[in-house]
Amino acid sequence: MTQTPPAFRHLGDRLVHQGYIWDVAVATFEDPHGSRFERDVVRSPGAVGVVPLLFDNGVPTVVFVRQYRGPLDRYLLEVPAGMRDVPGEAPEVTARRELIEEAGLDAGRLEYLTHYFTSAGMTDSVLHLYLATELSTVERDVHGPEETHMDVVRLPLAEAVDMVVRGEINDAKTVIGLLLVDRRLNHAAY
């Protein structure tokens, strides 16, 4: 039998920085004994990620983007993804839009894989992850210097999963997406 954890309460936020997409707040909480405490919190609209899967001569192949990530000052190999920066836009609509913008692909079929909390100790951001299949090529609709200079890369799924195991692919959404798609293809009970 599962016991209900003690109740914490969020009492409010004090905005300390309002950015283009993210806000930073000092949030006040109350613990189960009535003591108050504060935490810095990044408020985010969330994001989406898409694992584009095609079959090259029967071999499951994933389409990635290699793009510069300023906070890390390096290029990362990732699945296409983007912020939910259009108010009211459903996550699956954002996923389709980002797939076109970054990879130049339109999905005939888009399946929900999962959602997860990107860093629960510091942000309320939720990333929705999708599998895109029945892909057709369309013109890319790039935005910003990172997308202008990104490369689209295709790798067999098995090779990409091996790269995850070796620590060569270490972007969270990409790792989670690859492992879920690999499991789906290799375990019918998923």
Image (cartoon, rainbow, N blue to C red):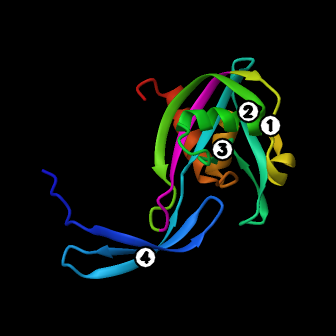
Disc 4 target residue: 39
The secondary structure type at the circle numbered 2 is helix
Proximity of marks 1 and 2: CB atoms separated by less than 8 Å: yes
**Magenta-span inclusion, residue 4:** no
Which is more N-terminal, label 1 or label 4? 4
Q: Nearer the viewer, residue 169 or 85?
A: 85
Image coordinates of residue 36 in percent, x first then y, are 29, 81
Q: Nearer the viewer, residue 163 or 22?
A: 22
Number of the label disc, if any, that sits on residue 141: 1
**Chain part drawn in magenta:** 122-134
Proximity of marks 2 and 3: CB atoms separated by less than 8 Å: no
Other-residue count near label 3 (Cα within 10 Å), few / some / many at <14 / 14–19 / ≥20: many
Q: CA distance from mark 1 to mark 2?
A: 7 Å
Disc 2 target residue: 100
The picture quadrant where one finds residue 176 is top right
Disc 3 target residue: 81
